[in-house]
Amino acid sequence: MTGVKIHDKEFVDYISSEKIQKRIEELGQEVHSDLAGKNPIFLGILNGCFRFSADLLSHVDTPCEINFLKVSSYVGTKTTGKVNELIGLNVSLKGRHIVILEDIVDTGHTVDFLIDRLQKEEPAGIKIATLLCKPSAYHGKHKLDYVGFEIPNLFVVGYGLDYDGYGRNLNDIYQIKT
Ligand SMILES: O=P(O)(O)OC[C@H]1O[C@H](OP(=O)(O)OP(=O)(O)O)[C@H](O)[C@@H]1O
Ligand SMILES: Nc1nc2[nH]cnc2c(=O)[nH]1
């Protein structure tokens, strides 16, 4: 790793691919032992989750379903401000053990929205797995069940995470140069 430049921004080496894969193996084993035999359904939140989802699930060896959802934010009306909408939910979640897969939990806004929305589907339970979490930015209502790395409140890219659409293909994670 030798840092990267994306558009106008410079990023420094932060978490190597080897370290990411080792931690994901540990998380995958934990997820497996908690959910084996429960017919879980994994819901990856696009776009950033695509790599974490694939690598985590390679360590989960029990029958399960995998779906991908998108949360889109838009301005509803002048009075309602920012609104979230869940796109792609086309399977019944009633009585299912859900695991939400995120690349990063930052403020917790997305996860709070997702859990409130998914609870309406009457699942048996909802767990959250995220590769990265920023504890100093997080003010969500929910406990995060599986966290790969706790990181400072600085912008990161790589391994699914983008800056202005670029950087998702990088195998390592980089932190913005301060
Ligand atoms: O905790 P929060 O402050 O809500 O931030 C977390 C969200 O931000 C990222 O998605 P983003 O909106 O960047 O979309 P992307 O995955 O398509 O890059 C990430 O994948 C989470 O969904
Ligand atoms: N790429 C990227 N997306 C985010 N979404 C929320 N926090 C971050 C971050 O640090 N990096």
Image (cartoon, rainbow, N blue to C red):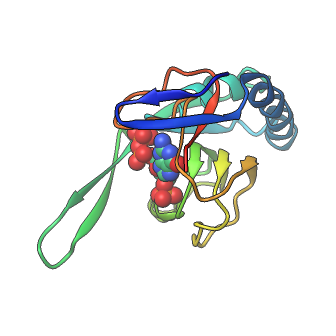
In this image, 81 relative to 97: left or right?
A: left
State the image coordinates of residue 95 (x, y, percent, origin top left): 61, 51
120 or 105, nearer to the observer: 105
In this image, 40 relative to 73: left or right?
A: right
State the image coordinates of residue 120 (x, y, percent, origin top left): 46, 62
State the image coordinates of residue 125 (x, y, percent, origin top left): 66, 56
Q: Is residue 70 visible?
A: yes
47 or 18, nearer to the observer: 18
Give the residue drawn at x 62%, y 33%: 173
Q: Quadrant of residue 9?
A: top left
164 or 2, nearer to the observer: 2
Give the residue drawn at x 86%, y 34%: 26
Give the residue drawn at x 54%, y 36%: 11
In this image, 148 relative to 170: left or right?
A: right
In this rendering, the count of numbered labels is 0
94 lies above or below 43: below
